[in-house]
Image (cartoon, rainbow, N blue to C red):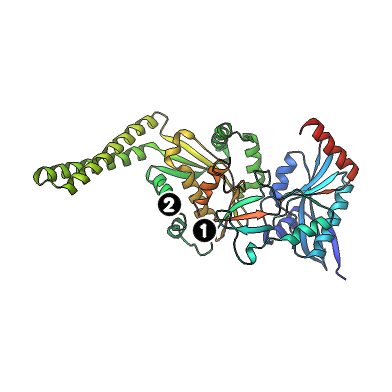
Amino acid sequence: MRDFEFVTLTPEEFDGFSAKHPQSNFQQTAAMGRLREGEGIDVEYLGMRENGRMVAAALFETHHGRLSTFSEVHDGPLCDWHDRELVERFMDALKHHAKAKGAAQLGITPEEPYRLRASDGGEIDGEQGAPADDIVETLKDCGFEHEGFTVGYTAVPRWRYVKDLSGISDEKALLKSYDKRTQWSVKRAASMGVHVRELGADELGVFADIERQTAERRGFEYRGEEYFRRFKEAFGDAAHFTVAEIHVAEYVADMETKRDALQAKVEALQAKQAQHPTTRTERQLGEETRNLEAARKRLAEAAEYAGDGDVLPAAASLFVENPRETVYLFSGSVERYKPFYASALIQHWAMLHLCVERGVDRYNFYGISGVFGDPDDEGRGVLEFKQGFNGYVEELTGSFVLPVRPMVFRLKNLAHRILGR
């Protein structure tokens, strides 16, 4: 008979286990625990040992709300979900612990994928594309209610877009791995005076302002500058708040160089056509004349941007490092500077510096809606942007809820329905 022991861990013990686990993620770290504690949430680090060896662990949250108390484990627990006996024993221990904390229910969102899919959401052949129905059935047998194979955005995404960076060792190979349009966008941004840098702790207001503008434009929740400051304090060097900035003088100089080169080309073609007219020269002259007019127009626009300042923040993103991956967590952009493709360059920067250069082969673009065939879906733009980097889709098993105090759980749900929330 297997010998299991349910234990409480120190933050250091938990991080030591989490860092080496195949499902390691930023939600299951002591850093996230510190952030949650700052929000007034009761945080514990719980684990399961087998014959003295740690085999499972969870950052266990208990929320004390006005209507009821409930417990949650985000992107976890960390365990071998195909080891049925371990799962049953650990879930039973977590259930009893939640009950002792006064929780009405325990919610979990396993990090283990339900199945992998192609970039367009289509099914893939082989073992990776096979659905992990055994995990769902095991949890149902443990008393959990599965909230379904849902689509749409949720606090803990059920659908993710991921890029495998295995075999990519330098910037040239990284850039080549994107689709042609995204390659063009990254190169275009770099040629237009856009540079990416990491923000200091005293500059988080820049990130927060861009995030606020984006939230207002797209209609999603704005976390607020104070949240981002607490996030940085909790995660320290693992949290990278970055900004892509337009250096206007560099952009203007580049545009002037291009305009002058096109002007010289047009004049040469005009002279050639005057001396010896041909249909081919006439066609080339027409094309380069149009290019010259476009360059002049962009130069005029550059003069307008110069009125905004010398260095213009165009996009900002938060990336979180983890031993297994780098996660793209939050981002925003300034609509006025959309033609500079700053968002594409900032993603390239993150993959290069936070993955390739530190030997991490997994880049997690995080949430997508899970809707692939509807061009009018609210997440279509986000999906297409991420697809441009040529990754794949992870469909997670989703959310599971275990009624710990069934009567209280049902009454709470009834109250939520009556109150409309």
Q: Which residue is drawn at 55% across and 40% down?
A: 376
Mark number, residue 319: none
Location of residue 94 in the rendering, given as x and y in whole percent from the top left corner:
83, 53
Viewer-side residue, 241 vs 378: 378
Viewer-side residue, 43 vs 287: 287
Location of residue 358 in the rendering, given as x and y in whole percent from the top left corner:
54, 59
Q: In which quarter of the image is the C terminus?
A: top right
Crowding near pointer 2: few (<14 within 10 Å), some, many (20+)? some
Q: Judging from the image, what secondary structure is the residue with disc 2 in?
A: helix
Q: Quadrant of the N terminus?
A: bottom right
- Read off the residue under disc 2: 183
The type of residue carrying mark 1 is Val
Location of residue 91 in the rendering, given as x and y in whole percent from the top left corner:
82, 56
- Read off the residue under disc 1: 356
The type of residue carrying mark 2 is Gln
Can residue 375 be seen in the rendering of this structure?
yes
Q: Which of marks 1 and 2 is nearer the N terminus?
A: 2
Q: Residue at x 81, y 52 (%)?
A: 144
> Could you give the CA–CA distance between mark 1 and mark 2, rounded to whole angstroms?
17 Å
Q: How many labels does the image show?
A: 2
Q: Which residue is drawn at 21% across and 45% down?
A: 283
Can residue 8 be seen in the rendering of this structure?
no
**Based on the displayed image, in which of its 4 quarters is residue 58 positioned?**
bottom right
Q: Residue at x 83, y 60 (%)?
A: 88
Question: Image height check: is 162 above or below 300?
Answer: below
Instruction: Locate residue 278 relative to residue 361 in the image: left or right.
Output: left
Residue most toward the left? Answer: 275
